[in-house]
């Protein structure tokens, strides 16, 4: 698959402007990113990661999304992206989650998480498959290790909710297809 084939077409459905015309809450809101390179924005310009674009659209680059960011609807918004490239679910629990402060009852959280993708693809079969780097594993290994990923995701979600006494909305992305939707890793350039 050539690079010119990647990244074409819409990222999703059109987003209507009407919900963004009014303030959603005057309450203090914290927007948090946890996870891997998807949330970190690997390969994008800093202002074009999905984390940044949800926070505040680049109106010149994406004029069709003008005014459709969290800064438009939450006047008391703070943000921090704890995500790191090349990380797996266990690192999200042990390294990123502890960095998130505990917020009191007057603060609402909006949390975006991408976790689990690197557990599946790390390191693209260059070494023996293990839990947390299972690319090329057997079916029997996958059954056990996928259950472990589920348990870690539960731990990550429960740990995140515990950080927000005033409650939070969590948006957990699905695990992406590293073959870019063709379900054929070898023809997508992967081993």
Image (cartoon, rainbow, N blue to C red):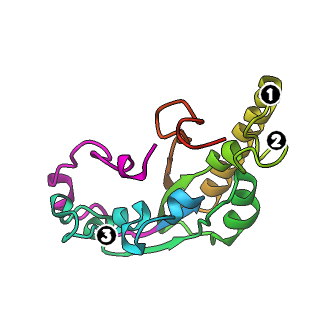
Kindly indicate the quadrant of the structure image that contains residue 55. Answer: bottom left
SS for dot 1: loop
Count neighbours of disc 1 (C-alpha within 10 A) and say few if under 14, some if 14 to 19, many if 20 or more.
Answer: few
Q: Is residue 119 visible?
A: yes
Q: Nearer the viewer, residue 156 or 35?
A: 35
Q: Report how far apart the C-alphas of labels 1 and 2 lie in the structure.
A: 9 Å
Q: Nearer the viewer, residue 166 or 121?
A: 121
Residue 176 place in picture, x, y as percent: 53, 42
Badges 3 and 1: C-beta atoms under 8 Å apart?
no
Kindly indicate the quadrant of the structure image that contains residue 62. Answer: bottom left
The mark lying in front, picked from 2 and 3, is 2
- Which residue position is annotated with label 2? 129
Q: Main secondary structure of the magenta part?
A: loop
Q: Which label belongs to residue 138?
A: 1
Q: Which label belongs to residue 56?
A: 3
Q: What's drawn in magenta, residue-wise?
A: 1-30
Residue 171 versus residue 71 in the image, above or below: above
Residue 171 versus residue 142 in the image, above or below: below
SS for dot 3: loop
Question: Of callouts 1 and 2, which one flags the residue occurring earlier in the amino acid sequence?
Answer: 2
Q: Which label belongs to residue 15?
A: none
Kindly indicate the quadrant of the structure image that contains residue 139. Answer: top right
Badges 1 and 2: C-beta atoms under 8 Å apart?
yes
Residue at 60% across / 36% down in the picture? Answer: 186
Residue at 54% across / 35% down in the picture? Answer: 187
16 drawn magenta: yes
Q: Report how far apart the C-alphas of labels 3 and 1 lie in the structure.
A: 43 Å
Residue 143 place in picture, x, y as percent: 77, 26
SS for dot 2: loop
Count neighbours of disc 2 (C-alpha within 10 A) and say few if under 14, some if 14 to 19, many if 20 or more.
Answer: many
């Amino acid at each position: 698959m050539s690079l010119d084939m990647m990244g074409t077409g819409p990222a999703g459905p059109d987003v209507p402007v009407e919900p963004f015309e009014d303030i959603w809450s005057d309450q203090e809101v914290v927007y948090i990113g946890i996870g891997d390179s998807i949330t970190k924005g690997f390969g994008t310009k800093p202002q074009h990661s999905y984390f940044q674009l949800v926070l505040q659209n680049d109106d010149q680059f994406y004029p069709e999304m003008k005014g459709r960011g969290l800064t438009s609807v939450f006047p008391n918004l703070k943000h921090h992206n704890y995500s790191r490239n090349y990380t797996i679910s266990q690192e999200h629990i042990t390294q990123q989650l502890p960095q998130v402060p505990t917020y009191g009852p007057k603060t609402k959280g909006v949390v975006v998480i991408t976790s689990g993708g690197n557990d599946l693809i790390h390191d693209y079969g260059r070494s023996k498959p293990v839990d947390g780097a299972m690319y090329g594993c057997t079916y029997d290994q996958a059954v056990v290790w996928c259950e472990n990923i589920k348990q870690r995701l539960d731990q990550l979600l429960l740990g995140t909710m515990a950080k927000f006494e005033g409650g939070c909305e969590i948006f957990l992305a699905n695990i992406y297809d590293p073959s870019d939707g063709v379900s054929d890793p070898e023809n997508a350039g992967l081993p």
